[in-house]
Image (spheres, helix red, strand yellow):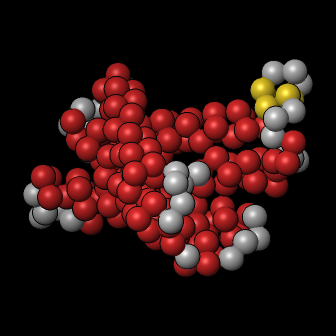
C-alpha cells in the first residue's frame, strides 16, 4: 500500500475524513500529550536524571534556533526585534511543536501506518502500542536527529540519565497523543 493511499483512506479514523474532528483531535492529543510530558519531566524524570525539573526541550529548541537562524542562546534574555527573548521564542517553538506538529505527525503518519501494519490487532490494543512506538520515534528524532545531526552533540545525550528520562518522556508524550486522538475517534 502506498503512502498516498494511506493518506487518502477516508475511513472513520482517517484525519482526512472530517477536518473539524482532526482539528479537535490534534488539540486534545496535544494537550494530553503535553500534560503527560510535563508531569514526567517535573516529577518522574528526577528519578532517572537526578535533575529537577528536566528542562531539555527548551534548551534543545534554543540550540536549534541558534543553529538554524543564528538566534544565540547565550543572549536568551535580550529581546529580539523588541518583541520576544530567544528563550520565549524557544518555548513557543517547543509548545507549538507539541500542540500541532507531533499530534499531526501521529494522525497523518503513525496511526495510518499502525492500522496498515497491524490490521488484525484490535484498535484498543493498537492505539497504545502505536503511541508508544511513535513516542520512541520522537525520542530518536530529538536525541539523534536534532541533538546529534543538527547540533553536533553526542548521540542520545551520551546515554546518560537524561537520555533515559527523555526516552520515557517521549514515549509518554506519544501515548498521550494517541489517547487524545483515540478519544476524538481519530486514532
Judge whether 61 appears above or below 92 on screen.
below
Image quarter of the N terminus: bottom left
Question: Does 18 sit left or right of 23 as displayed?
Answer: left
Image quarter of the C terminus: top left
Q: Quadrant of residue 13?
A: top left
Query: How many discs mark residues in the rendered view?
Result: 0
| Residue found at x 89% / y 24% | 81
Image coordinates of residue 101 in percent, x first then y, are: 52, 42
Viewer-proximal residue, 83 or 15?
A: 83
> Is any part of residue 15 visible from this angle?
no
Judge whether 120 appears above or below 76 on screen.
below
> Is any part of residue 161 visible from this angle?
yes
Image coordinates of residue 52 in percent, x first then y, are: 52, 54
| Residue found at x 31% / y 52% | 175
| Residue found at x 78% / y 26% | 84
Image coordinates of residue 161 in percent, x first then y, are: 51, 72
Question: Does 161 sit left or right of 136 as displayed?
Answer: right
Viewer-proximal residue, 5 or 80?
A: 80
Viewer-proximal residue, 123 or 143?
A: 143
| Residue found at x 14% / y 53% | 123
Image coordinates of residue 47 in percent, x first then y, are: 41, 65
Question: Does 112 sit left or right of 77 as displayed?
Answer: left
Q: Quadrant of residue 63?
A: bottom right
Amino acid at each position: 500500500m502506498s503512502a498516498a493511499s494511506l493518506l487518502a483512506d477516508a475511513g472513520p479514523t482517517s484525519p482526512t475524513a472530517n477536518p473539524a474532528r482532526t482539528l479537535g483531535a490534534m488539540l486534545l492529543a496535544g494537550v494530553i500529550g503535553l500534560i503527560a510530558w510535563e508531569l514526567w519531566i517535573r516529577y518522574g524524570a528526577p528519578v532517572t536524571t537526578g535533575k529537577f525539573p528536566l528542562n531539555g526541550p527548551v534548551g534543545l529548541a534554543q540550540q536549534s534556533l541558534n543553529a538554524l537562524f543564528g538566534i544565540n542562546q547565550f543572549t536568551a534574555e535580550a529581546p529580539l526585534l523588541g518583541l520576544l527573548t530567544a528563550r520565549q521564542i524557544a518555548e513557543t517553538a517547543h509548545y507549538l511543536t507539541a500542540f500541532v506538529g507531533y499530534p499531526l505527525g501521529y494522525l497523518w503518519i503513525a496511526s495510518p501506518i499502525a492500522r496498515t501494519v497491524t490490521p488484525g490487532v484490535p484498535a484498543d490494543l493498537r492505539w497504545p502500542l502505536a503511541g508508544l512506538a511513535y513516542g520512541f520515534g520522537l525520542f530518536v528524532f530529538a536525541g539523534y536527529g536534532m541533538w546529534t545531526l543538527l547540533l553536533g552533540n553526542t548521540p542520545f545525550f551520551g546515554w546518560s540519565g537524561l537520555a533515559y528520562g527523555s526516552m520515557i518522556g517521549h514515549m509518554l508524550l506519544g501515548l498521550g497523543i494517541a489517547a487524545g486522538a483515540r478519544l476524538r475517534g481519530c486514532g
